[in-house]
Image: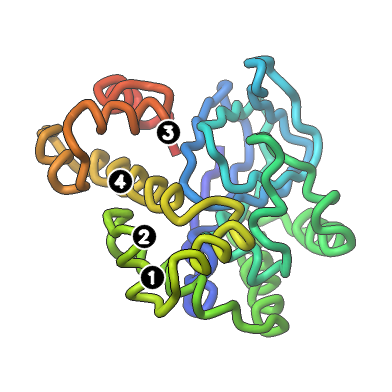
Amino acid sequence: MIVRFSKPAFPLSKYVESIYAYIGSSSEIARKLIPDGKTDLMLNFSSNLYFFDEKKKKQEITKSLIQGIRREPLTFIFGKNINIIGVRFLPLGFSKLLNIPDKELQYKNRPVYAKDVMGNLLPEIEEKIFEESDADKKILIIENWLLELFNERKPLDILITGAVQAITQRKGTISVKEVCDNSGGIYKKIQRTFHDELGISPKLYSRMVRFESIHNELRTLKEVDWMSIVGKYNFYDQSHLIKEFKFFSGTSPEEFLSKIDLFV
């Protein structure tokens, strides 16, 4: 199977984490998406793609989809035939480039068909991708399309962008009070702006960023000192750490570590 990941250059890098391609045959690959405050657009060209719904039933996805900000982990299964070109948007990225607030993409922690959200924008880019056979060129088409959208859009509110940036830079270990101080806002306004744009509170977003930071660090460690993780990421104690792992991954820290390649 052909797998490609590309990180776009500035200014798209402020809003898009990566553009990716999965093309070819697979052996029922499962991936568990942890809540991380990001949004995925997955252009689906006749792939065998499935997810488990809130009742743990396996559901097939037959069209292009959007997976918005999640509050719970969500498991996707790539079937035997895969032809997917995707974009992983950073927080506020979908809002900036597609002019649709991130909060509008939350559908009870399940994917939504992209056509229902993007309207006429979707067939245009799907046709261009479909006509190109080379995976790297498909990714380049997506990047150029996003850059065109970027040039057409107005800047986002500096209050929300500053708050998101402050939380990201501190890996989720910053308090809401510090976020307010750093972004020049007041508590109630920051809370309201987060709910209006992202559909979640700044505290929950901070927790998401913190957990993703831990996830990324665990991938680099040969040996893990859990008490060091507790102190570094401002947990009250190890019990608090375990509760966060249960909340974001549905597993204990040790189980998460043993299956870390499953989580994205």
Between circles 4 and 1, the one closer to the viewer is 1
Residue beneath disc 3: 248
Residue assigned mark 1? 180
Alpha carbons under labels 2 and 1: distance apart: 6 Å
Compared to 153, does 128 lie above or below?
above
Q: Are marks 4 and 2 in contact (CB under 8 Å)?
A: no
Give the mark toward the camera: 4 or 2.
2
Which of the marked residues, 1 or 3, is nearer the chain's N terminus? 1
* Camera-side mark, 4 or 3: 3
**Label 4 to label 1: alpha-carbon separation:** 27 Å
Mark 4 neighbour class, 10 Å CA radius: few under 14, some 14 to 19, many 20 or more: few
Q: Position of residue 249 (x, y in %)?
A: 42, 29
Ranked by sequence position, the earlier of labels 4 and 2 is 2
Q: Nearer the viewer, mark 1 or mark 3?
A: 1
The crowd level at tag 1 (other Cα within 10 Å; few <14, some 14-19, many 20+) is many
Mark 2 and 1 residues: CB-CB less than 8 Å, in contact? yes
Label 2 Cα neighbours within 10 Å, binned few <14 / some 14-19 / many ≥20: some
Depth order, front residue of 150/167: 167
| Residue at 61% over, 53% down | 199
